[in-house]
Amino acid sequence: MLVPLACAAPPETKLTTAQIRAMLGGHHVTDGRHWGHEYRLDGRMERSENGRTRSGRWSVQNNKLCLLLPEVGKVSPVCFDVGRVEGGELQYRDAGSVVYEGTVIKSPSR
């Protein structure tokens, strides 16, 4: 039985440690409506999610984006696989499920 292409998931390219750093450092990732993450080059991040702004830290370890979110835990980061899908959007995945999907834009100069 053939599966129509319209039902197939878009191809995804899983990013490496170097690719994640290059793609996110100094950039903003957003879905354009509900959330946005600004990744500063010094490892700090500013997150805006559903109208709330919070600070955190980001790093990349073993080909995963790791976010240290104080409201979740002050010691252990939450880590995600990062993939680029057709069309250029990024997906953050945890255990195969998409947690965030958004577009990368250059952060405004401060």
Image (cartoon, grey):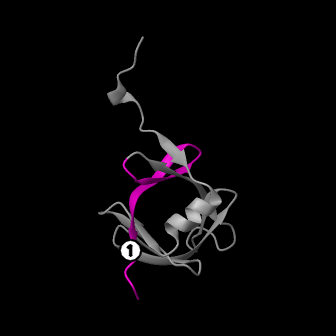
Give the prevailing secondary structure in the magenta stretch: strand
Quarter of the image for residue 21 reads bottom right
The reply to whether the magenta stretch includes residue 107 is: yes
State the extent of the magenta-drawn residues as a range.
Answer: 87-110
Who is closer to the viewer here, 49 or 79? 79
Which residue occupies 57% across, 71% down? 69
Quarter of the image for residue 80 reads bottom right
Tell me: 89 left or right of 94. Answer: left
The reply to whether the magenta stretch includes residue 22 is: no
Which residue occupies 42% across, 11% down? 1
Up the image or down, 107 lies above or below 96; here it is below
Tell me: 51 left or right of 56. Answer: left
In x, y percent, where is residue 108? 37, 80
- Count of marks placed on residues: 1
In x, y percent, where is residue 7? 36, 28
Identify the residue position indicated by label 1 in the image: 52
Which quadrant, please, contains the C terminus?
bottom left
Q: Specify the amino acid type for callout 1.
A: Arg
Q: Secondary structure at mark 1?
A: strand
